Image: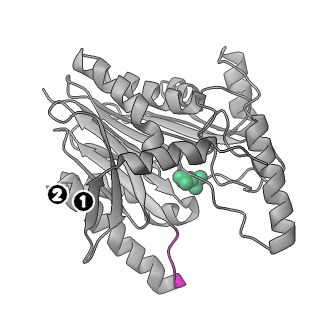
Amino acid sequence: MSFGSIATWRMAHDGIVESLNSLEKGGTAGDAVESTIKVVEAYPYYKSVGYGGLPNIEGILQMDAAFMCGDTFKIGAVAGIEDVMHPISVARQLSHDKFNSFLVGEGATKYAMLNGFERRNMLTERAKKMWENRLAEMAEHNLSPYDGHDTIGVVSLDSHGSMSAGTSSSGLFMKKPGRVGDSPLSGSGFYVDSDVGGAAATGLGEDLMKGILSYEIVRKMEEGLSPQEACDQTVYPFHDKLTKRYGKAGAFSLVAMNNKGEWGVATNVEFTFSVGNDSEEAAIFIANMGENHTTVIEPITQEWLDAYEKRIKAPIK
Ligand code: ASP
C-alpha cells in the first residue's frame, strides 16, 4: 500500500521527513499529521505557528488549529486558543468528542488546561519585539498590518489506506482579538476523505473562506481529477473570480494528496511546500502560478534555503 505526506511551506519539511519514517514502519496518518505539526508549533523561529508566532494587535498570541480523520470525518478544532504548546493536539483530542468538538477562545484554553495539555507563554521575546516594531511602523507609515502569516497544513496517507488532515496557525499578524481565519474551518482550511484524498490551505483566510477551496479540491478528485488537476482547476478559477469582483485576490496556496499518494499544489503567490511518499523521498519544492491555470513547480535551491535560514534568524532591532 502507498503512503505519503504533503504540507504547506518549507517550515513543514523536518516534520514531513520524520512522519514519512514512521509511515514507512506502519504508523498512522493521524499520528503523521499531528507529529509534523507539533515540530513546527515548537520551533521558535517560525513566526506564524505556535511558539514564537506573531501576536494580535493587543500583543496576545491567539492560535487556530484543526484535525480531521478521513475515515470517520471526525473533526476537532480550536480557535483563539492561548498559552497552549500544541493546539493541534487539543484539536485532535476534541475530534474524538461527539459534542463540543470545536471550541473557541477561553473555552478552548480552559479545555486544554483541564485536560492536561502543556501550557506555556507562547509569546517569545523575538515575536514581542516584532510586534512593537510593527506598531511603531504602522503609526509612522500607515502600513497594512496583516502580512507575516503562514499556516502549516498537512495531509497524510498511511499504508493502511487511512488519511488525515490538520492545520495550525497564529493567523494574521496584528489581527483583531477574536479574529478567526480559515485554518480551523472544515472545507476551507482543510478537508479529507480516506476514499478520495485530502487538501489543506494557507493564505488570506478571509478570501480562502469565500471559496471553500479544500473541500472543492477533494470533490474534484472524487470526480476523477488528479490532485494537480483538482488544485489547478479549483484555485485559479477562484483567483479569477475574486480578481473580477475585487480587482485583486488575497494570496493563497493549497496542497492536496489523493489516496494513492499522488499530490498536487496550486498557488497565486510564490509558495514552498514539502512532500514525500513511498516512491519519492521527502523534498522541498517551490511553486508559482503559471500560464493558463497551471502551476510551475521546481525543486528548491540551496541558495533559497540559505537565504531563508538567514532571514528567519536575523536579529531583530
Ligand atoms: N490562513 C491563515 C489565516 O488566515 C493565515 C495563513 O495561512 O497565512 O488565519
Are dots 2 and 1 in contact, CB under 8 Å?
A: yes
State the SS at label 1.
helix
Is 249 within the magenta?
yes
The residue indicated by pointer 2 is: 225
Q: Residue at x 42, y 30 (%)?
A: 14
Say whether mark 1 is within 8 Å of ligand 1: no
The residue indicated by pointer 1 is: 230
Q: Is residue 235 visible?
A: yes
Q: Is residue 185 visible?
A: no
Is 27 within the magenta?
no
Q: Main secondary structure of the magenta part?
A: loop
Q: Magenta segment, which residues?
A: 246-250
- Residue 274 at x, y percent in the picture: 35, 42
* Colour setup of the view: one colour
Q: Residue at x 26, y 76 (%)?
A: 291
- Residue 105 at x, y percent in the picture: 73, 39
The image shows residue 50, relative to residue 220, as above or below, that is above
- Residue 221 at x, y percent in the picture: 21, 53
Q: Mark 2 belongs to which amino acid?
A: Leu
The image shows residue 237, relative to residue 55, as above or below, that is below
Say whether mark 2 is within 8 Å of ligand 1: no
